Amino acid sequence: MCLLVFAWKVHPDYDLILAANRDEFLNRPARSATFWDDEPELLAGMDLEGGGTWLGVTLDGKFSAITNYRDMKLHKENAPSRGKLPLNYLNGRKPPSTYIESIRSGADSFNGFNLITGNRNAIWYYSNIRDMPKELGPGIYGLSNHLLDTPWPKVVKAKEALAAIVASHEPNHEKLFRLLHDRTPAPENQLPDTGLDRAAEKKLSSAFIEMDGYGTRASTVIMLKKNGQLEFRERVHQNSDQETPGDSCFRFLIHG
């Protein structure tokens, strides 16, 4: 994922309201979100190159997502796929805090990442750039390609939009998709410096990205009610040459 905003336990009816964009090279093969044949309790997209995922949930209420940390000076060649980090949490039995502790010793082998792991009771954030695991309290949070709540313009704007949706007490998927589909770039004086040229930083500064060979390939909305009803919607823009852009929706009552 390259933009992720979520409201955790701040709405009277929902424990989690999450909206996320996956930005990726258009030629990297991927499968849209579905239940996996070999992991029937896992609902997630699949990176067909690395074998992992960028965002997923399980029937027992676990959820996880990852964003890349963009700093060209820190890039490692031949690093392992970061998509295995959320996947291994979702497929395992460790609670969020224990899982994060279990990956810390090997976290430096990966390129920079931000990892969110959670269940109905707790949500944790971890980045291998700072190596400071943190349990998150109730609130509205945002991630792009820096650290949690770094005030990049698209993160600030998306958090404000999510806060307005939560305050309206009428969250719905179309409102959340609208905040994800914002194509407005950041002002020149607010662009981050991640080692790319300014033209590239400008194109990457909007919530929804459209570039030659790279862009927002899927948008996802997750809404988990306090009664355990989970709704997972994915809007595919371009996920692979074999799949047609479109929407999918999954609803289920979590167990456990």
Image: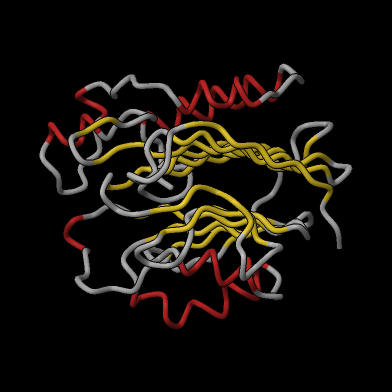
Residue 172 to residue 229: above or below: above
What scheme was used to colour the molecule? secondary structure
Residue 230 in the image, given as x and y percentages of width and height: 76, 43
Rendered residue at 69%/42% (across/down)? 250
Compared across the picture, whether 252 is left or right of 192 comes to right
Quadrant location of the C terminus?
Answer: bottom right
Rendered residue at 41%/75% (across/down)? 107
Residue 47 in the image, given as x and y percentages of width and height: 42, 59
Residue 67 in the image, given as x and y percentages of width and height: 42, 52
Compared across the picture, whether 102 is left or right of 224 comes to left
Residue 82 in the image, given as x and y percentages of width and height: 40, 66
Residue 153 found in image quarter? top left
Residue 255 to residue 165: above or below: below
- Residue at the extreme top of the image, as rendered: 168
Compared across the picture, whether 124 is left or right of 230 comes to left
Give the number of marks.
0
Question: Can see residue 140?
Answer: no
- Please name whichever residue, 203 or 237, is drawn nearer the observer in this view of the structure: 237
Rendered residue at 30%/37% (across/down)? 215
Residue 72 found in image quarter? bottom left
- Please name whichever residue, 136 or 17, is drawn nearer the observer in this view of the structure: 17
- Please name whichever residue, 60 or 106, is drawn nearer the observer in this view of the structure: 60
Residue 243 found in image quarter? top left
Residue 116 to residue 179: above or below: below
- Please name whichever residue, 202 or 209, is drawn nearer the observer in this view of the structure: 209
Compared across the picture, whether 145 is left or right of 199 comes to right
Question: Can see residue 118?
Answer: yes
- Residue at the extreme right of the image, as rendered: 227
